[in-house]
């Protein structure tokens, strides 16, 4: 069976990669919009309603506009913006979130694609909240280091233009220092936390790759637990998941001479989860490709689940 797919925002970073994933598939017919009609509402509406699935790779307001154009009840919208991620009428497109999440994605015509930082944070923390080890009202502090591709076309152009000369772009740059990052609502909602985390991201001078690190104090736990206990909770929660690997509690095996490789999952749809530390203080780290499982790969995975085809089809 062949499915018609339209990418609204096909020339953005996420849209381009979704098109790249899908162009190789014999079960997908890609509906393309002419470049000079990208802002033509009538043409966008025609293609959206002609599709089985439309991906929205647009800013929030433009994504909301596209949703308003839908009049075909059979068209599934997968929105990569932040516009609908905590909207109760939309399904969060993270199949590994819970045992019933795949059934929700399959049944839904409105799917919100998770954010890149949020994906790593949620996958790292939700099992600990679900197990009762972390009380829901725990204040979590976390940071994230990510490649500059997460900033979109302008940031990519800035970094690539700066690559030939000394510049501040050669060094990592902290941002969102007002502590109101746009991923906070989903990070709180889908971990089961009742308090937003203290979250501070950093953009690095490399193209892609992302690692979120959450800081845990055993005093926060509801019962005594070692790093190995925390690792086991994660491993049990994600047992059988094709795209999630929970590393053994082994610092030497998970680092290169003590240094952590943020880029190790690039060009894949995989997430690696790690526990580091000791009995007195711990780190839980989630690593992924911010353009893969953090964006376009996740969107294609959600589409596969919705359509009822092999979940890993077209993904690595």
Image (tube, rainbow, N blue to C red):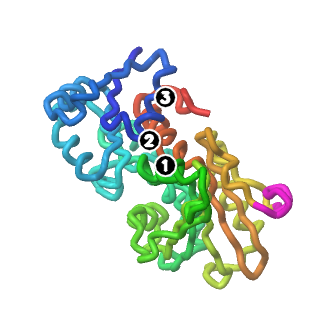
| Residue at x 75% of width, y 82% of height | 280
Q: Which residue is mark 3?
A: 20
Q: Are marks 1 and 2 in contact (CB under 8 Å)?
A: yes
Q: Which residue is mark 1?
A: 156
- N-terminal label among 3 and 1: 3
Q: Which residue is mark 2?
A: 13
In front: mark 1 or mark 2?
Answer: 1
Report the Cα–Cα distance between label 3 and label 1. Answer: 19 Å
On screen, residue 254 versus residue 117, left or right, reads right
Q: Point out the image quarter for the N terminus.
A: top left
| Residue at x 39% of width, y 44% of height | 104
- 249 or 107: nearer the viewer: 249
Overall secondary structure of the magenta section:
loop
Q: Residue 198 at x, y = what percent?
A: 49, 76
- N-terminal label among 1 and 2: 2
Q: Are marks 3 and 1 in contact (CB under 8 Å)?
A: no
Q: Which residues are magenta?
A: 250-259
């Amino acid at each position: 069976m062949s499915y018609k797919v339209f990418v609204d925002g096909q020339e953005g970073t996420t849209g381009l990669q979704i098109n790249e994933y899908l162009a190789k598939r014999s079960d997908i017919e890609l509906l393309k919009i002419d470049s000079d009609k990208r802002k033509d509402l009538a043409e966008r509406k025609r293609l959206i309603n002609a599709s089985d699935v439309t991906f929205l790779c647009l800013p929030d307001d433009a994504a909301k506009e596209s949703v308003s154009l839908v009049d075909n009840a059979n068209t599934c919208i997968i929105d990569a913006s932040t516009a609908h991620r905590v909207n109760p009428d939309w399904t969060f497109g993270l199949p590994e979130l819970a045992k019933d999440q795949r059934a929700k994605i399959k049944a839904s015509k409105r799917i919100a694609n998770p954010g890149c930082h949020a994906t790593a944070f949620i996958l790292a923390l939700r099992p600990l909240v679900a197990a009762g080890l972390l009380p829901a009202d725990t204040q979590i502090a976390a940071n994230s280091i990510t490649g500059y591709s997460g900033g979109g076309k302008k940031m990519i152009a800035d970094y690539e233009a700066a690559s030939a000369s000394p510049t501040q772009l050669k060094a990592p740059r902290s941002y969102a220092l007002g502590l109101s990052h746009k991923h906070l609502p989903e990070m709180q909602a889908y971990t089961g936390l009742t308090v937003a985390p203290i979250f501070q991201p950093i953009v690095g001078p490399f193209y892609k790759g992302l690692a979120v690190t959450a800081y845990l104090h055993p005093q926060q736990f509801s019962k005594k637990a070692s790093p190995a206990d925390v690792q086991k909770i994660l491993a049990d929660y994600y047992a059988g998941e094709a795209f999630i690997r929970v590393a053994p509690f082994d610092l030497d095996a998970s680092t290169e001479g003590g240094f952590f490789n943020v880029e190790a999952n690039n060009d894949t749809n995989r997430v690696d989860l790690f526990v580091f530390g000791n009995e007195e203080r711990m780190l839980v780290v989630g690593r992924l490709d911010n353009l893969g499982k953090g964006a376009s790969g996740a969107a294609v995975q959600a589409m596969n689940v919705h359509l009822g085809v092999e979940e890993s089809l077209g993904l690595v």
